[in-house]
Image: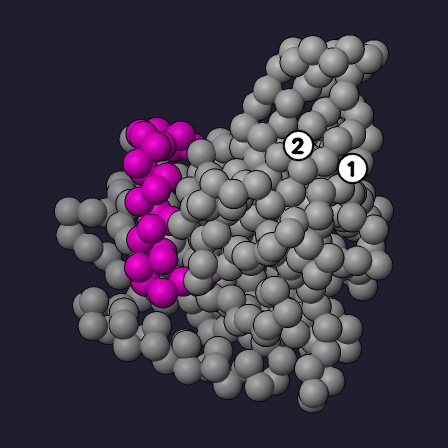
Amino acid sequence: IEMEPCLDRSWLSLRVNTSVTDGVTLEAEVKDSDGNVVATGEGTSGTVFRLTLSSVHAWSPDDPYLYDLKLTAKKNGIVTDQVTSYCGMRKIEVHKDNRNLPRIYLNNEQIFQMGPLDQGWWPDGLYMPASDEAFYFDIKAMKNLGCNMIRKHIKIEPARWYYWADHLSILVWQDMPSPNLPQGYGDFAKTNFEEEVSHIIPAIKNAPSIVHWVVFNEGWGQFDTNRMTTFVDNKVNALTPARFGKASLICCASGWTDSEIGNIIDTHSYPNPSCPQNANRAAVCGEYGGITLKVPGHIWPGGDFQYTVVETSQDFTTFYNGLCDKIEDMYYQGLNAAVYTQLSDVEIEKNGFYTY
């Protein structure tokens, strides 16, 4: 199933692929949180069809409103399969404010995004959490700190992580995994990257929380930036015509090697934030901070990596608040978002809001 909302037109665009196509028709039904049917529609396998909702309640970081979706497959008029899911109606775009600065707008209102870099590591399972509750904890902890965004860093999570991002209502910047091109295997790595992206995006793009896709990070494995950014954009924003808006924003590269394409221009700077300048793309600081506070009994062995060090939790708070003051000043220069490094310590990187 692929789905894309078009908030201004009250549309939900759908494309459903079935293993059997001959004689198969599809029926879709959308219900609101009270169980009322607000949209129905019919289509065929592999083609885009649209449902128009009779009333629309937008999803946002302040309001995790989700609709129930039921899809029924019939072959020659007989029900053969049925699945249920959920969807959220929201809109994100970049356009200029009254000072001619490119700004990010969510559901037609300007939004400033603040949140952490999240590498998705756990000390007991590395890339795999101990439980579903671990996913829930990380996202809920960031909401409790006042964050409205998480940058999921060069990692794709299992669907449950995005489920909690949707239901706890936090915006997600989703990086594409982009390791350095291995010497002698560059062509293979490029082909593999494109093939993986083709699988990754349809698998998770339905999550209303994902509003921002990062194609490359800091030049890691970066190649054919314009072509690959267009490739990702076409995969993400595939169902709704561009003249009616896009489902998500695209950043060609977070950090170093920028190309004049996509909706976002992104810089990294430590420890102080920075504000890149661009006439048409929204400026964000994709990484800053990295304040190291070593907590006895919570220090992972095996080396040290740090940008700046403080001695006490009060020092950490003072330093962090000072960075936030600089971010507020940069808003008036055109900054739209700032990503703090990071959600938790990760082994030798001891710069998290939380210890490892």
Disc 2 vs disc 1: Cβ atoms closer than 8 Å? yes
Residue on which the image places disc 1: 49
Picture layout, residue 105 above or below residue 226: below
196 or 27, nearer to the observer: 27
Residue type at tag 2: Ala
Is residue 232 within the magenta segment? no
Which residue is at a point 45% across and 59% down the rendered structure image? 63
Instruction: Look at 27% across and 72% down and name the residue there.
Output: 317
In percent of the image, x 47 and y 66: which residue is there?
114
Where is the C terminus found, in terms of image quarters? top left
Q: Which quadrant of the figure contains the N terminus? A: top right
Q: Position of residue 219 (x, y in %)?
A: 67, 51
Q: Position of residue 333 (x, y in %)?
A: 61, 84
Q: Is residue 64 left or right of residue 188?
A: left
Which residue is denoted by mark 2 in the rendering? 28
Q: Position of residue 15 (x, y in %)?
A: 74, 33
Question: In screen coordinates, is 317 left or right of 135?
Answer: left
Q: Find residue 234 and report its image quarter.
A: top right
Pick out the residue farthest to the bottom: 99
Q: Secondary structure at mark 2?
A: strand
* Residue 291 position (above or below residue 240): below
**Dot 2, crowdedness within 10 Å: few (<14), some or many (≥20)?**
many
Residue type, label 1: Phe
Q: Is residue 33 left or right of residue 24?
A: left
Nearest the viewer among 68 and 254 is 68
- Range of magenta residues: 125-152
Q: Is residue 247 above or below residue 103?
A: above
Q: Earlier in the sequence, mark 2 or mark 1?
A: 2
CA separation in Å, label 2 and label 1: 10 Å
Task: Name the foreground residue: 269 vs 72.
Answer: 72
Return the x and y of residue 102 as percentages of the image width and height.
70, 76
